[in-house]
Amino acid sequence: RVAASLIKQHLASVRFGGDSAAPWTPHFDVVVIGGGHAGTEAAAAAARCGSRTLLLTHRVDTIGQMSCNPSFGGIGKGHLMREVDALDGLCSRICDQSGIHYKVLNRRKGPAVWGLRAQIDRKLYKQNMQKEILNTPLLTVQEGAVEDLILTEPEPEHTGKYRVSGVVLADGSTVFAESVVLTTGTFLRGMIVIGLEMHPAGRLGDQPSIGLAQTLEKLGFVVGRLKTGTPPRIAKESVNFSILNKQTPDNPSIPFSFINQTVWIKPEDQLPCYLTHTNPQVDEIVLENLHLNCHVKETTRGPRYCPSIESKVLRFPNRVHQVWLEPEGMDSDLIYPQGLSVTLPAELQEKMITCIRGLENAKMIQPLLSRQRYGVQYDYMDPRQISPSLETRLVQRLFFAGQINGTTGYEEAAAQGVIAGINASLRVRHKPPFVISRTEGYIGVLIDDLTTLGTNEPYRMFTSRAEFRLSLRPDNADSRLTFRGYKEAGCVSQQRYERASWMKSSLEEGISMLKSIEFLSTKWKNLIPESSISSGKSLPLRALDVLKYEEVDMELLARAVPEPLKKYTQCRELAERLKIEATYESVLFHQQQEIKEVQRDEALQLPKDLDYLTLKDISLSYEVREKLHLSRPQTIGAASRIPGVTAAAIVNLLRFVKTTQ
Ligand code: FAD
């Protein structure tokens, strides 16, 4: 009775729908709050799944706005983009219409960890995204600030104290919905910081979201506080590029989207980036002025992997840090100095910048004109309060996606957005949730990390977080996710499904063809290194094995055996994917065996007295030892879920424990 009365009191303090609703109140299947990177993906995904969807956001003209760096992708983030694209999401396609400098990062390593990245024209991205969103069938876009949620009694067959059934806007109007997706980014009780000045705002020039933050807290959500920041922008004409290292784009450009063979702009017309570095003078200015900087003084956590210059100077004293000077757009006069996010008072920012090589005469653009160079602190919801479908455990049919869950980055937001949109729509149709596991995709890794481990600092994706990264590659995201998206969620277009099906069957056919072509190694002698042909003894080698050599690609192989291999070189993507499949064939076979081994022994108990830091006769990196030491997992399964503990380390640990038992 006490519990029932508490629930009643709680419900009385929040808004309800029901009889008070006017008959003309709009009613949608899915309402998405927030038109940022998570919100646009969520709204478009719900609409693609066939739900009548409303996107409610402060301003339509900020849809597609990049709050910080005008770039997409990178290590781990590029993987997320390919997976969003495999589910027919928007950001990869829009990037391919707006990119101005394409570069694959991590090229020296294997293709499993390549990071597709592009510098993007900020204005063009916004335009293209708005065009896409405003023309999506079944999707209505409306400006408005959501202040409150409308709640009803929960459905007894589901967990959750309440059920959401609509939203209340700042002007008091209401909209009813079967599911609601909340993607409010840094806006919940957002507070902008420049030097010692602080004022409420979601982003510079945008209002914060206070009412909604209070509603969520009142409902009982556990709320935390995080911070992030962005650098000043510099006038392009004031930079002395001639003395800096120039980075040219890749030729050819690798598109982000599976449905594109090329991007909108030729490599030779793309813009270069430049590299410079900080120096001891920068450190001096930062350290002498810490007392003038409340963003740094705050104990709130900022992004570890994209820290402010103040955090870098404090954490790594006497080190030189890279500063990439990147164009903001094809016709833009602004340069984005990546690595110089700062919240010092404005005059000190200028002093700091002008002591960097190439920036001696740099002119900073006014923050309000460029909307930049500030820090922001905001509320986020502890993501352990959501399930793997991104539905909250407390409020049925309410989904959270994006920075509200403690992540940072456009790609992390987009990845959650697409999953929340799909699941909000499936929920309306009483269909089972669409969940991606850690073995299926980086999206699975991201959501599993958030929902099981939570986060106390802005979470970003890295390849090292994925245990099965050899199989979760950027090249094969379509074969992992497109078919599921098409069949289970209905979020994938017929055209994309057919393209993925064609690619899948062409790959299967190509691989079996390459396995069937077998010659003595002497026949391949112009292709493979001399040392591979053992003296006097020529071994039969499959074409697939020859393709594994670094020096060999499909073009070379098809020159040696034009029939039947020539046809596999007609499509660049197919030829490259065959090469990648060949490269990973045997490694993947071993990995599959290891996955099975770990799955079989997931429940194996780890001895309580293991001293991971000093353990001998086992190969574990110091980082892994430290993580095991701090987390003290009870089972092999729990150890495998610790971020940064690699699959190889788990296999070694498993074998070690089994032999010592
Ligand atoms: P956002 O893109 O912020 O979108 C939120 C949307 O919700 C906005 O359109 C807003 O108008 C709308 N909204 C909010 N409340 C309401 C409401 N009550 N009613 C209606 N609409 C509402 N990421 C990095 O990876 N590296 C960085 O260095 C980095 N620096 C950043 C610096 C700054 C200053 C900021 C603000 C962000 C930075 N980010 C950075 C983060 C990156 O921009 C976000 O992770 C990403 O944009 C989050 O997407 P989102 O959709 O969750 O939120």
Image (spheres, rainbow, N blue to C red):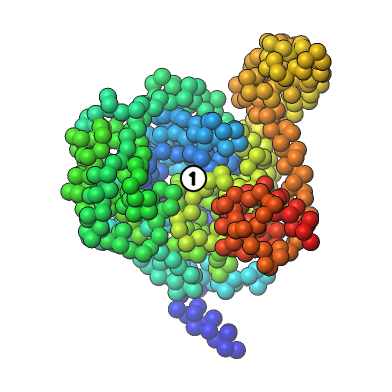
Q: Is residue 566 left or right of residue 374?
A: right
Q: Which quadrant would residue 449 be assigned to in this image?
A: bottom right
Residue sitting at 67 percent across and 63 percent down? 610
Q: Is mark 1 within 8 Å of ligand 1?
A: yes
Mark 1 secondary-structure assignment: helix
Q: Is residue 87 left or right of residue 516?
A: left
Residue sitting at 59 percent across and 49 percent down? 621
The quarter of the rendered structure image containing the C terminus is bottom right
Choose between 550 and 197: the one closer to the eye. Answer: 550
Instruction: Say above or below: 216 vs 549.
Output: below
Q: Residue 60: x and y, percent? A: 37, 47
**Amino acid on which the number 1 mark rests in the picture:** Glu
Residue 278 visible here = yes
Q: Residue 18: x and y, percent? A: 52, 72
Residue located beneath label 1 in the image: 411
Q: Residue 376: x and y, percent? A: 33, 56
Residue 15 visible here = no
Choose between 408 and 550: the one closer to the eye. Answer: 550
Residue sitting at 74 percent across and 54 percent down? 656
Q: Residue 164: x and y, percent? A: 53, 66
Instruction: Say above or below: 537 vs 36.
Output: above
Instruction: Say above or below: 114 vs 562.
Output: below
Choose between 426 and 344: the one closer to the eye. Answer: 344
